Image (cartoon, grey):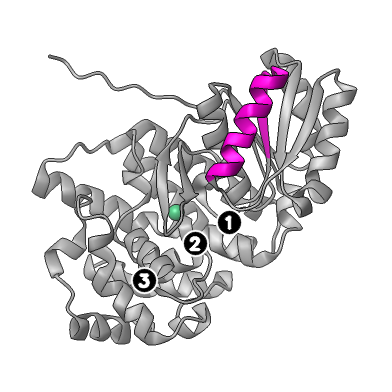
Amino acid sequence: MIETHRIDLPRIVLIGEGVLDSLGSTCQELGFDSALLVTGRTTFEIAGKRAMENLRSSGVRVEEVFVGTAKLEHVSNIRERVEKHGHKVLIGVGGGSVIDTVKIGSTRAKKPFISIPTTASHDGIASSVASLKSLHRPYSVKTQSPIAVIADSKIVRHSPYRFTASGCGDILSKHVSVQDWKLAHEVRKEYYGAYAASLAFMSANLVMEQAENIKECTEEGIRTLLEALVSCGVAMSIAGSSRPCSGSEHLFSHALDLIAPKPALHGEQCGVGTIMMAHLHGLDWEKITNTLKILGGPTTAMELNIPEEYLVEALVKAQSIRPERYTILNEVNLTHSKAKALAEYCKVV
Ligand SMILES: [Zn+2]
């Protein structure tokens, strides 16, 4: 039997200064006359309000709903509202948790969604994978891809810079995740898609080249980062899994989320993980460190504000977070002393 490979991609992607004002016309173009806008309290002030005015002036009926962290109760609330009022589309305006909630909510309500990120903190803005907080731990949920992505670089440029640097850490991690994927293909005969892998790898290289522009928050720099984040989402859709964008460095970050009393941002942890996993892969880890330094992102446990012992423990436990995901960690088997030596060698502790 010939295996088929289904790829769902966004139909419209708008990136640039002031593109938020094209939301109404985008909805008209796609035939949506009624929308549920999902946002947070702060992001409503930053972009949600303007989005609603723009929709109304284009003749789109819209009501808003406020959500916090991506939790199941928000998801069911969204679904009920959509069913009750017959909304044609969901629009997520906000950071990672808002977008994740909309992704899951819209998938369950069987309605399309539009992603409007207000920060560039990670590559979930255009992907078909979301993270949901359950009672004890967050877990990944497969969702649909957004039908449209509207990433206004002016809004992102004015967001707290820490989020932007975090997004860069998430993108730089593709240097490692692509290698882990290749390794899994060689050792375990796992499916490997050269096109998806190249797209993720290219995004990481472009962000590396634009590091100084991103640090200065120039239009070109922020646009490159947004394009990279969207491209990585597309790479995951093409691959049909998070494989091209999530390897051992992501397992390390997930472990920190569970172990550290106060975890740092996802992309910040992935960036630091990338330094150490790059070394395990025999890549130029110092180049990763230097790029993160140019970007003003953390490169050490101290800068992550996580005590060293938790970081070492996260290295030891990383592979057990998702045992089926074969990575370089399966080859090196990090004991406590090996993990500590690795972190020391890479100047992370
Ligand atoms: Zn990530």
Extent of the magenta region: 72-92
- Do the residues bearing badges 2 and 1 touch, measured as CB atoms within 8 Å? yes
Quarter of the N terminus within the rendering: top left
Q: Is residue 177 above or below residue 160?
A: above
Magenta stretch: residue 31 in it? no
Q: CA distance from mark 2 to mark 1?
A: 7 Å
> Quick check: 294 left or right of 345?
right
Q: Main secondary structure of the magenta part?
A: helix
Please rate how many residues cluster around mark 3, counting C-alpha atoms within 10 Å: few if below 14, some from 14 to 19, many from 20: many
Q: Is residue 285 above or below residue 157?
A: below
Disc 2 marks which residue?
A: 267
- Give the residue displayed 32% in from the left and 73% down from the top: 314
The number of discs equals: 3
Disc 1 marks which residue?
A: 121
Is residue 97 something one can see in this rendering? yes
- Give the residue displayed 70% in from the left and 12% down from the top: 31
Magenta stretch: residue 90 in it? yes
Task: Give the residue type that dot 1 points to.
Answer: Ser
Sequence-first tag of 2 and 1: 1
Task: Give the residue type that dot 3 points to.
Answer: Ile
Q: CA distance from mark 3 to mark 1?
A: 19 Å
285 or 51, which lies in front?
Answer: 51
Disc 3 marks which residue?
A: 275
Please rate how many residues cluster around mark 1, counting C-alpha atoms within 10 Å: few if below 14, some from 14 to 19, many from 20: many
97 or 325, which lies in front?
Answer: 97
Callout 2: CB less than 8 Å from ligand 1: yes
Element carrying mark 1: loop
Quarter of the C terminus within the rendering: bottom left
- Do the residues bearing badges 2 and 3 touch, measured as CB atoms within 8 Å? no
Q: Nearer the viewer, mark 3 or mark 1?
A: 1
> Quick check: 59 left or right of 100?
right
